[in-house]
Amino acid sequence: MRRLYHLPLSPYCRKIRLVLAEKKIEVDLIEEKVWQQNLDFLRQNPAGKVPMLKMNGLVLAESSAIFEYIEESNPSPPLLPRNISERAEARRLQSWFDDKFHNEVTANLLYERVNKKLMGAGYPDSAKIKAGSKNIKYHIDYMGWLLESRRWLAGDMMTIADFAAAAHFSSLDYINDVDWERNSAVKDWYAKIKSRPAFRSILADQLPGFVPPDHYADLDF
Amino acid sequence: MRRLYHLPLSPYCRKIRLVLAEKKIEVDLIEEKVWQQNLDFLRQNPAGKVPMLKMNGLVLAESSAIFEYIEESNPSPPLLPRNISERAEARRLQSWFDDKFHNEVTANLLYERVNKKLMGAGYPDSAKIKAGSKNIKYHIDYMGWLLESRRWLAGDMMTIADFAAAAHFSSLDYINDVDWERNSAVKDWYAKIKSRPAFRSILADQLPGFVPPDHYADLDF
């Protein structure tokens, strides 16, 4: 059986869960508390990170490599355009969220509020929370600007860029850190992606000790 | 004309320079001091990072997306294997170096010693230098372990994994932060990749104020 080692609010894991669900590839989810440095897990993935996917007899690691593997082995429905310049744009935006957005927003908000508590690593740093809350505004504005001329973030079709972004936003929405009223195009985009069947498992996540806001799983938020 | 906006010691830029040179794609190199937040540059790449590549009428950003674009548009010689599980391994290791190695080693050594000085952002933090010097040992050991059973890092052929790794190591070698005596297989691997014509431009880099050690450009180091 296919197995995805994950953490419920990890945006990288959520991105892969969305990709798998969109392509109707069933997996068993196994929660891996990476900070416990489980030796059996480290032997399989010395990077010590989730997601790690066991599939087709392989042990796959690093979310962008996992995505490309799934896209190549299960091309339908595609999450990259056919045209190579459009593929570059989808991958650019995947990196935008997984690198820039992560560093400026997710690490400041989610990791401070949730990961620190889970790991018993102290209290949130208010300077970081403040920086993350400020930075997310610019990112929402940038997405709004992209969505002025595009149906989806990278162009006319839904791609890995949308799943990467939605993964980060859904985790931040769980802790009520997204101001959906800032930009109506971004809100509409999220409502559209959130209503896909692939999103169901993510909306059903429950993290003990952290209660999501009412609108988290509401499709008509 | 094709243009690569870069910084000489940026491992992500060096990775793309190696990829372009290996595929014999000529580019003009334009140094972009990203910390100066040049508005014309930011308009073209709002992430404000290098590398940024202008090619075929496109503006490409994010080194992994740039690599995939070059690989798709100029497939020869290939830097990804044909077999999709081997491709996943090459991409996993690219991410290993660009994420884990970067955070644990490059950010602690290169950014402390070089970037801070270039940006006028103070002196190196000795705790970070110490952490980077310790961490690089484990990475060299891991590479040595991979190279016990493989000709190149990801398998039998040279791939983007080797270029990603060599890009980081060459930048660290410029500031003499690599102990090449720690593992002979890693030293042999670097000698092999360093002797490729694609490496010449990187070995000719001169950063004002930073003199590389004698062995930096020596192919028989």
Image (cartoon, coloured by chain):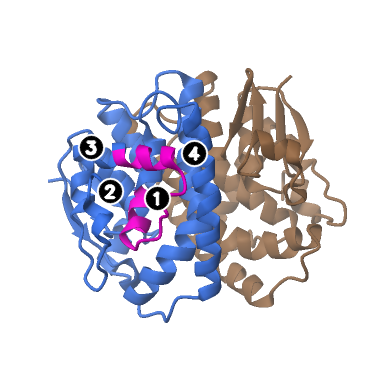
Chain colours: A brown, B blue
Residue B144: mark: 4
* Chain hosting mark 2: B
Front residue of this view, candidates B173 and B65: B173
**Count of all numbered marks drawn on residues in the image:** 4
Looking at the image, tell me whether mark 1 or mark 3 is earlier in sequence order.
1
Q: Is residue A203 left or right of residue B211?
A: right
* Residue at the image position 12 percent from the left and 46 percent from the top: B1
Sequence-wise, the earlier of marks 4 and 2 is 4
Give the mark nearer the N terminus: 1 vs 4: 4
The amino acid marked with disc number 3 is Arg
Q: Give the mark, 2 or 1, whose residue is nearer the N terminus.
A: 1
Tags 2 and 3 on a common chain: yes
Q: Horizontal and vertical percent for residue B158?
A: 35, 30
The image quarter containing residue B5 is bottom left
Q: Is residue A213 left or right of residue B96?
A: right
* Tag 2 residue: B221
Chain under callout 3: B
On residue B180, the disc is 1
A30 up-or-down from B82: above or below: below
